[in-house]
Image (cartoon, rainbow, N blue to C red):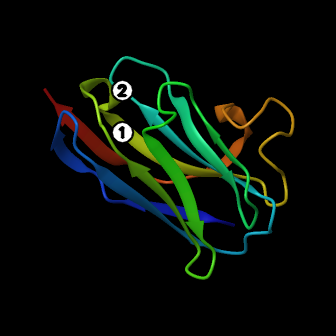
């Protein structure tokens, strides 16, 4: 069983930057899709970005393209989300999640489908003020 643990959230002003980290425990097979999601109050959880663990494929929601970068450090079993040019509308709880080991990001309903993800972290709050 994989257990993600997020860290790195905080409060910044409009235009600021934050880097979120997701530490992973358990066995993770190469090719497994790892995603970052966010949920603002009163809204549904939505996909932000995803990466193929051990591979080079990355995926982004249009709202964050060019501002956010997802990356990984497999030696440390971590997935990172660098967030630049933050906007107030980026304010949300951010979650790291993984699908079942071995399943990629393009399988089934796609990387952004929350129903595909089996293991979720507790979340880290990101607040961007104007």
**Residue beneath label 2, please?**
40
**What is the secondary structure assignment of the residue under circle 1?**
strand
Q: CA gap, disc 2 to disc 1?
A: 6 Å
In the rendered image, the vertical position of residue 118 relative to residue 61, given as above or below: below
In the rendered image, the vertical position of residue 56 relative to residue 54, given as above or below: above
Asked if marks 2 and 1 touch (Cβ < 8 Å), the reply is yes
Q: Residue furthest top?
A: 42
Which of the image's four quarters has the C terminus? Answer: top left
Which of the image's four quarters has the N terminus? Answer: bottom right
| Residue 119 placement, left or right of 9 | right
Q: Which residue is at a point 82% across and 39% down the rendered structure image?
A: 106
Q: Position of residue 129 (x, y in %)?
A: 14, 31
Q: Is residue 125 visible?
A: yes
**Residue beneath label 1, please?**
93
Q: Position of residue 87 (x, y in %)?
A: 28, 29
Q: Is residue 122 visible?
A: no
Res 26 quadrant in image: bottom right
């Amino acid at each position: 069983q994989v257990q993600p643990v997020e860290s790195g959230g905080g409060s910044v002003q409009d235009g600021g930057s934050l880097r979120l980290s997701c530490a992973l425990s358990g066995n993770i097979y190469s090719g497994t899709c790892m995603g970052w999601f966010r949920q603002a109050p009163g809204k549904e959880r939505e996909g932000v970005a995803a990466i193929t663990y051990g591979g080079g494929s990355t995926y982004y929601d249009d709202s964050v393209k060019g501002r956010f970068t997802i990356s990984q450090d497999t030696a440390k079993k971590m997935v990172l989300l660098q967030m630049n040019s933050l906007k107030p509308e980026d304010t949300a709880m951010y979650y790291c999640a993984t699908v079942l080991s071995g399943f990629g990001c393009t399988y089934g309903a796609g990387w952004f489908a929350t129903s595909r993800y089996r293991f979720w972290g507790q979340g880290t709050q990101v607040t961007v003020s104007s």
